[in-house]
Image (cartoon, rainbow, N blue to C red):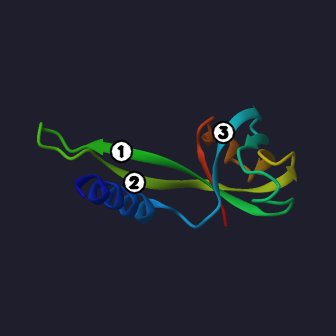
């Protein structure tokens, strides 16, 4: 019974953290104007708009701290140029955004 309670609690927690939006990451930066993102042909298509995000975390400090406090920061937007396959697509960031994007940057369909 104790194990069942633990499993159900974990499942509830994970479902509470789940997002319904399409999300991926920048996996390769060819140039500032061409980014490979981990969002495939079932998630995005040419012409779709995406937004780029980073996380800024500040430690709470102390041994009793529950973890870091993080804020999701929007870097800018871009457009899907082409879906490459079921896993990856090519994205062109808007002017000036590509310089701020790095491999690992979070990408969300908007």
Task: Estimate the x, y position of residue 10 in percent, counting from the top left.
Answer: 35, 56
Q: Dot 2: few (<14), some (14–19), or many (≥20) neighbours within 10 Å?
A: few
Viewer-side residue, 47 vs 40: 40
Task: Estimate the x, y position of residue 17 in percent, counting from the top left.
Answer: 43, 60
Q: Mark 2 points at which residue?
A: 71
User: In which image quadrant can residue 16 be found?
Assistant: bottom left
Q: Earlier in the sequence, mark 1 or mark 2?
A: 1
Task: Estimate the x, y position of residue 11 in percent, counting from the top left.
Answer: 40, 59
Instruction: Specify the quadrant that holds the N terminus.
Output: bottom left
Task: Identify the residue at horizontal 21%, vertical 47% (top origin).
Answer: 66
Q: Dot 1: few (<14), some (14–19), or many (≥20) neighbours within 10 Å?
A: few
Marks 1 & 2, CB-CB < 8 Å contact: yes
Q: Mark 3 points at which residue?
A: 99
Residue 85's place in the image compared with 62, above or below, is below
Task: Identify the residue at horizontal 78%, vertical 44% (top origin).
Answer: 88
Give the tally of numbered discs. 3
Task: Identify the residue at horizontal 76%, vertical 41% (top origin).
Answer: 35
Q: Mark 1 points at which residue?
A: 57
In-image side of 46 versus 103 (left or right): right
- Kindly report which numbered mark, 3 or 1, lies closer to the viewer in this rendering: 1
Kindly state the secondary structure of the residue where label 2 is placed: strand
| C-alpha separation, residue under disc 3 versus residue under disc 1 | 21 Å
């Amino acid at each position: 019974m104790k194990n069942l309670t633990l499993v159900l609690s974990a499942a509830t927690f994970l479902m509470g953290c789940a997002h319904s939006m399409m999300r991926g990451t920048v996996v390769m930066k060819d140039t500032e104007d061409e980014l490979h993102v981990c969002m495939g042909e079932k998630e995005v298509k040419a012409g779709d708009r995406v937004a780029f995000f980073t996380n800024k975390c500040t430690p709470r400090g102390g041994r009793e701290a529950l973890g870091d406090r993080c804020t999701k920061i929007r870097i800018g937007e871009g457009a899907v140029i082409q879906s490459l396959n079921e896993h990856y697509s090519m994205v062109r960031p808007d002017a000036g955004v590509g310089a701020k994007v790095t491999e690992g940057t979070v990408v969300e369909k908007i």
